[in-house]
């Protein structure tokens, strides 16, 4: 069975999830607790990209995600 990357497996206590809007370049950072609360601990990068909406310009699904 293949294990997919998700927030629970990849983020440690001090890590920050960075989410950047491609069209407007807005950057948001969430700590482990906030990312788990907003997205759920089993969220994959694809889940986050599909659901995220930029708070600056309102675009949905056009973001970069990294830790």
Image (spheres, helix red, strand yellow):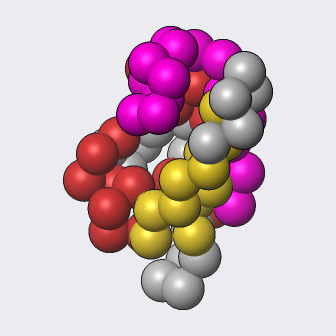
Front residue of 53 and 14: 53
User: Is residue 51 rendered to the left or right of residue 5?
Assistant: left
Q: Quadrant of the N terminus?
A: top right
User: Is residue 29 rendered to the left or right of residue 66?
Assistant: left
Q: Position of residue 42 (x, y in %)?
A: 42, 42
Q: Quadrant of residue 43?
A: top left
Asked if residue 15 is positioned above or below residue 41 in the image, the reply reads below
Q: Residue at x 40, y 34 (%)?
A: 55
Front residue of 45 and 23: 23
User: Is residue 65 rendered to the left or right of residue 35?
Assistant: right
- All told, the count of numbered labels is 0
Residue that lies at the very extreme toward the left in this rendered image: 37
Magenta residues?
A: 52-67
Front residue of 57 and 31: 57
Q: Residue at x 72, y 21 (%)?
A: 23
Q: Main secondary structure of the magenta part?
A: loop
Q: Position of residue 58 (x, y in %)?
A: 44, 18
Q: Residue at x 58, y 25 (%)?
A: 49
Residue 28 visible in the displayed image: yes
Front residue of 2 and 58: 58
Residue 1 visible in the displayed image: no
Q: Position of residue 66 (x, y in %)?
A: 72, 51
Q: Quadrant of the C terminus?
A: bottom right
Magenta span includes 32: no
Residue that lies at the very extreme toward the bottom in this rendered image: 14
Q: Quadrant of residue 45?
A: top right
């Amino acid at each position: 069975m293949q294990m997919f990357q998700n927030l629970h497996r990849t983020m440690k206590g001090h890590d920050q999830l960075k989410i950047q809007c491609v069209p407007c370049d807005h950057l948001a950072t969430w700590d482990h607790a906030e990312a788990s609360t907003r997205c759920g601990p089993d969220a994959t990068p694809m889940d986050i990209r599909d659901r995220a909406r930029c708070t600056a310009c309102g675009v949905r699904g056009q973001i970069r995600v990294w830790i």
